[in-house]
Image (cartoon, grey):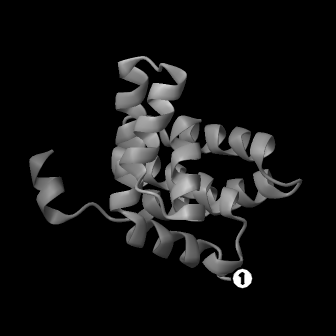
């Protein structure tokens, strides 16, 4: 939730994610492990924003990013980072968590929208062929 709030504030007000996260950590007296994990999610999503947004646009062609609800876009960004770049959480768990966040913070249709976009991205990622270098390692 802290990662979501941090990235949402970045998207709305363009505040530096590191500073926003630090403020949340201090205001809420968060455990260092919580801050560490939230930081990984926030900075990871922030550092891969261009790639993540391209995945969103590819999976949701009828919804330009500028017209998408900011909370939905932020939830998608976090989940896509977890699914495609982080890999510490199983993809299905990341999708389920994103759907639950959408039910709590999004609109009536957010959870279905997010589930559909993330399902498309997950399925595409599953279908990508293993590169020659990776197959030689195994």
Q: Is residue 118 above or below residue 58?
A: above
Residue under circle 1? Answer: 62
The structure residue drawn at horizontal position 40% and vertical position 56%, both measured from the top left corner, is 16
Residue 77 in sight here: yes
The structure residue drawn at horizontal position 35% and vertical position 40%, both measured from the top left corner, is 40
- Left or right: residue 63 versus residue 124 is right
Question: Is the N terminus in the top left, top right, bottom left or bottom right quadrant?
Answer: top right
- Left or right: residue 89 versus residue 122 is left
The structure residue drawn at horizontal position 65% and vertical position 39%, both measured from the top left corner, is 96
**Front-most of 43 and 92?**
43
Where is residue 106 drawn, in percent x and y? 78, 51
**Front-most of 54 and 129?**
54
Where is residue 48 drawn, in percent x and y? 36, 62
The structure residue drawn at horizontal position 27% and vertical position 60%, both measured from the top left corner, is 130
**Front-most of 71 and 9?**
9
**Front-most of 106 and 118?**
106
Question: Is the C terminus in the top left, top right, bottom left or bottom right quadrant?
Answer: top left
SS under mark 1? loop
Residue 87 in sight here: no
């Amino acid at each position: 939730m802290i990662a979501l709030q941090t990235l949402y504030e970045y998207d709305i007000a363009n505040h530096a994610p590191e500073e926003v996260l630090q403020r949340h950590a201090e205001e809420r007296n968060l455990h260092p492990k919580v801050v560490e994990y939230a930081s990984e999610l926030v900075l990871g999503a922030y550092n891969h924003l261009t790639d993540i947004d391209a995945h969103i646009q590819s999976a949701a062609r009828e919804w330009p990013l500028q017209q998408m609800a900011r909370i939905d876009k932020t939830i998608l960004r976090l989940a896509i980072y977890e699914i495609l770049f982080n890999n510490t959480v199983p993809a299905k768990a990341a999708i389920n968590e994103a759907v639950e966040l959408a039910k709590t913070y999004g609109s009536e249709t957010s959870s279905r929208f997010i589930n559909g976009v993330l399902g498309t991205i997950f399925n595409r990622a599953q279908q990508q062929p293993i590169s020659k270098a990776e197959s030689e390692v195994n």
